[in-house]
């Protein structure tokens, strides 16, 4: 057993840290409203600031958006531990960068895509040339994702797509949908779904914004009216999409901005000291509780990286980690507002708001952590069924 | 022992709910939340016509002669529906303070206007320190030519932007004990030197920064005696705290009702999500939180209403209800999933208010400390 980084990992940690302090736009970490674990304030969804875009390209130039992929597809050939180190540092600075394309689409294509699909998409993703949004949920397919109804019917070399996606984070700032469609309505629910890549510019798509409770435009409703997709945009085999998506959801659940938890607690501790509350027994107790839980989350985080490096795909571990992180997101937000009291209620627009009103926004955004990417209940179901062998609810 | 409402109270509760459902739909709530003033003069007028503004005041001041318990029941109904506007500030924070601490002249002058809906009030108590202890009152009032001159900054002042009068809590002398040098002034909000700025907040309630810059107040506008202001505030806060609990109980009940209705109709995995044990347990937890809150709140309100010592019961009610309302709305959000994360949905209206209510006049931890003190710790 050894909980230290290797020399190479330590060097990489320092390299990433130095890069971030130098290249991230000034005061980005302080100004950015990104709440750890939340999906409603992810920096990339709040419009594309030119400086964030520039920063993303700098990451891409270093090969850091595809750290673990083989070099032949534009990747960096690094270990998962190094990938985790990168994620940890990046999230500590609340930096923009990785997204659905690099974190979900890329790894899935790598694992299940044809050689042609790999050559077509992976280098473009690694270079940050394309943005993807996750087109999974529908109005009647949330937790019950296999209930999706959006259909794709064959027409020569094309599929004709009709239906609706909802809670579509970032659809308004993306180039392609990474999308689940029903290609075989007569097969059992899980066996008639395909994964396709659909161009956002295709005729027949309309995107309608949904404003989330933080007041941000992070997600959308997207309607598909006879949208044509080339059949070669099917990822892997037709009708096997459900299984690819499930494997990919495990990646998504591992994308936890672990460093942001740490930084947010550090800021809270600083505020408490400044306000002269550091001798308050209750405040101390609450901050200590948080510090302990963040340590635990870190252990889950590093452990999953170790598993991946051993060639194991975290599954139960991904669910446990997602659950822990979501609950921590909530606890951090609720504790922050509670400890800060009236100051915690203040919106970012108010000059009196400590650390830019992030607590106020976090109190709202933590809801998305608890219900997004598989709600806490779904995670518990997975843990109970797959982990503990209990019958599926 | 009797936990039930009287016939009149049942009637008040039901008619208030029916009225608000019709006159204050969520669309209006949303619109007012997002507006600058945060209240509807038309709805305000109708509420006044129903006698709500005067409910707790004696008939000789134009009121309805109801008890504090009656007011709590009305507030519960208002919390259930959500009614943006300065009712709590005007009737509870302002009106009840004037009723118990005001001179006969002040009561005769102000309470009929409150009762008829023609006067709005706000309590300017907290300062940038955001503490509820006397030692933190730094805003100063100095005697000058038979008047007082107030200087200082108040923060988190609910509804000051539309108030006609502010109850300003100011330090009038440096005393050995901080609570012995405080006075409450009735300040005309149009006085020169009063500057009010709206703060954007979590609950989108209308809290303000109020700056007093050499504001001149006649000494006749002292409420409850020179240097006796802290007692006025203590007495008021006890009532205001229970009143807020009543409102929160109503809100928690609404969140529970919404969530249960949705759990019965939302179908996933080919059956209503309410058939899943996880959701069932959430609903069960919510019921126990809502009912528990109502019981302790009613008990505290009843003690206040009867004029019995209530420090312990009020702290218990606030400690429990504030945290419970937060838990209930959080579970409500959990049951609604993604649709609840949209602005167009109603759950966040409650979720926001739960935290604001929990914080106001001391959160659960603050109240637990009072409970511990009352236990002799």
Image (cartoon, coloured by chain):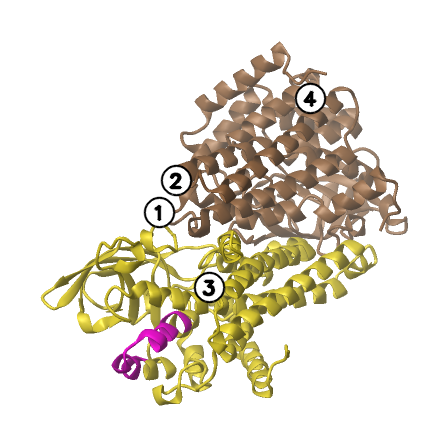
Chain colours: A brown, B yellow
Looking at marks 1 and 4 on the same chain, the residue that comes earlier in the sequence is marked by: 4
Q: Secondary structure at mark 4?
A: helix
Which residue does the image show at 57% across and 72% down from the upper left?
B298
Most prominent secondary structure in the magenta stretch? Answer: helix
- Circle 1 marks a residue in which chain? A
Do marks 2 and 4 share a chain?
A: yes
Crowding around mark 3 (Cα neighbors within 10 Å: few <14, some 14 to 19, many 20+) is: many
- Circle 2 marks a residue in which chain? A
Do marks 1 and 2 share a chain?
A: yes
**In screen coordinates, is B14 left or right of A73?**
left
Above or below — where is A361 with respect to B367? Answer: above
Looking at marks 2 and 4 on the same chain, the residue that comes earlier in the sequence is marked by: 4
Q: Is residue A38 at least partly visible in the picture?
A: no
The disc label shown at residue A80, or none: 4
The magenta segment: B92-110
Residue B93 drawn in magenta: yes
The disc label shown at residue A351, or none: 1
The disc label shown at residue B119, or none: none
Q: Are marks 1 and 2 in contact (CB under 8 Å)?
A: no
Do marks 1 and 4 share a chain?
A: yes
Q: For mark 3, what is the residue?
A: B33
Q: For mark 2, what is the residue?
A: A276
Q: Are marks 1 and 3 in contact (CB under 8 Å)?
A: no
- Circle 4 marks a residue in which chain? A
């Amino acid at each position: 057993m050894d909980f230290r980084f290797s020399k190479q990992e330590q060097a990489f940690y320092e390299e990433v840290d130095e890069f971030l302090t130098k290249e991230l736009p000034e005061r980005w970490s302080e100004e950015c409203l990104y709440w750890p674990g939340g999906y409603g304030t992810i920096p990339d969804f709040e419009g594309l600031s030119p400086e964030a875009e520039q920063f993303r390209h700098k990451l891409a130039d270093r090969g850091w958006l595809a750290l673990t992929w083989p070099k032949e597809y534009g990747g960096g050939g690094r270990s998962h531990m190094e990938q985790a180190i990168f994620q940890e540092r990046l999230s500590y600075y609340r930096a923009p960068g990785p997204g659905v394309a690099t974190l979900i689409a890329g790894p899935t294509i790598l694992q299940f895509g044809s050689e042609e699909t790999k050559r077509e998409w992976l280098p473009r993703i690694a270079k940050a040339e394309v943005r993807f949004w996750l087109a999974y949920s529908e109005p009647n397919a949330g937790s019950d994702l296999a209930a999706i109804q959006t259909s794709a019917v064959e027409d020569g070399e094309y599929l004709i797509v009709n239906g609706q996606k909802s809670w579509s984070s970032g659809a308004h700032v993306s180039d392609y949908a990474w999308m689940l469609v029903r290609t075989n309505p007569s097969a059992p629910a899980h066996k008639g779904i395909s994964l396709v890549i659909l161009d956002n510019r295709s005729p027949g798509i309309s995107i309608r914004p949904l404003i989330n409770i933080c007041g941000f435009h992070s997600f959308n409703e997207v309607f598909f009216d006879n949208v044509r997709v080339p059949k070669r945009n099917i990822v892997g085999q037709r009708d096997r999409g459900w299984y690819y998506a499930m494997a990919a959801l495990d990646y998504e659940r591992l994308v936890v901005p672990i460093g942001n938890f740490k930084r947010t607690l550090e800021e809270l501790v600083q505020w408490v000291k400044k306000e002269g509350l550091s001798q308050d027994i209750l405040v101390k107790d609450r901050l200590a509780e948080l510090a302990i839980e963040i340590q635990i989350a870190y252990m889950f985080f590093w452990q999953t990286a170790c598993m991946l490096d051993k060639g194991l795909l975290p599954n139960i571990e991904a669910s446990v980690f997602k659950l822990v992180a979501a609950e921590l997101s909530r606890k951090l937000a609720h504790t922050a507002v509670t400890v800060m009291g009236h100051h915690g209620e203040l919106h970012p627009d108010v000059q009196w708001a400590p650390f830019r009103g992030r607590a106020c926004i976090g109190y709202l955004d933590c809801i998305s952590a608890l219900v997004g990417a598989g709600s806490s209940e779904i995670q518990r179901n997975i843990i109970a069924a797959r982990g503990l062998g209990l019958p599926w609810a | 022992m009797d936990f039930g409402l009287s016939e009149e109270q049942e009637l008040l509760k039901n008619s208030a709910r029916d009225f608000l459902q019709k006159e204050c739909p969520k669309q209006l709530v949303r619109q007012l939340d997002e507006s600058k003033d945060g209240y509807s003069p038309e709805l305000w007028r109708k509420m006044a016509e129903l006698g709500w503004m005067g409910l707790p005041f004696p008939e000789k001041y134009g009121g309805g002669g109801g008890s504090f318990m009656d007011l709590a029941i009305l507030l519960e109904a208002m919390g259930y529906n959500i009614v943006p506007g300065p009712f709590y500030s005007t009737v509870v924070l302002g009106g009840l303070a004037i009723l118990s601490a005001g001179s006969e002249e002040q009561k005769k002058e102000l309470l009929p206007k409150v009762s008829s809906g023609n006067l709005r009030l706000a309590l300017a108590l907290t300062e940038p320190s955001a503490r509820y202890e006397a030692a933190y009152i730094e805003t100063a009032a100095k005697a000058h030519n038979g008047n007082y001159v107030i200087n200082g900054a108040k923060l988190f002042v609910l509804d000051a932007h539309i108030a006609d009068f502010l109850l300003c809590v100011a330090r009038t002398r440096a005393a050995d004990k901080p609570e012995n040098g405080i006075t409450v002034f009735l300040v005309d909000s149009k006085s020169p030197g009063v500057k009010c700025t709206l703060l954007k907040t979590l609950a989108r309630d209308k809290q303000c920064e109020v700056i007093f810059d050499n504001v001149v107040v006649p000494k006749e506008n002292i409420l409850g005696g020179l240097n006796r202001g802290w007692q006025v505030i203590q007495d008021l806060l006890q009532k205001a705290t229970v009143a807020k609990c009543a409102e929160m109980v109503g809100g928690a009940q609404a969140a529970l009702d919404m969530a249960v209705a949705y759990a019965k109709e939302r179908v996933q995995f080919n059956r209503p999500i309410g058939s899943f044990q996880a959701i069932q347990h959430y609903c069960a937890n919510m019921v126990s939180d809502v009912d528990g809150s109502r019981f302790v709140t009613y008990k505290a309100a009843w003690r206040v209403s009867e004029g019995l010592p209530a420090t312990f019961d009020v702290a218990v009610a606030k400690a429990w209800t504030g945290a419970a309302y937060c838990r209930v709305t959080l579970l409500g959000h959990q049951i609604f999933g993604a649709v609840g994360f949209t602005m167009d949905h109603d759950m966040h209206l409650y979720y926001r208010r739960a935290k604001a209510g929990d914080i106001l006049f001391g959160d659960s931890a603050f109240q637990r400390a009072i409970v511990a003190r009352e236990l002799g710790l």
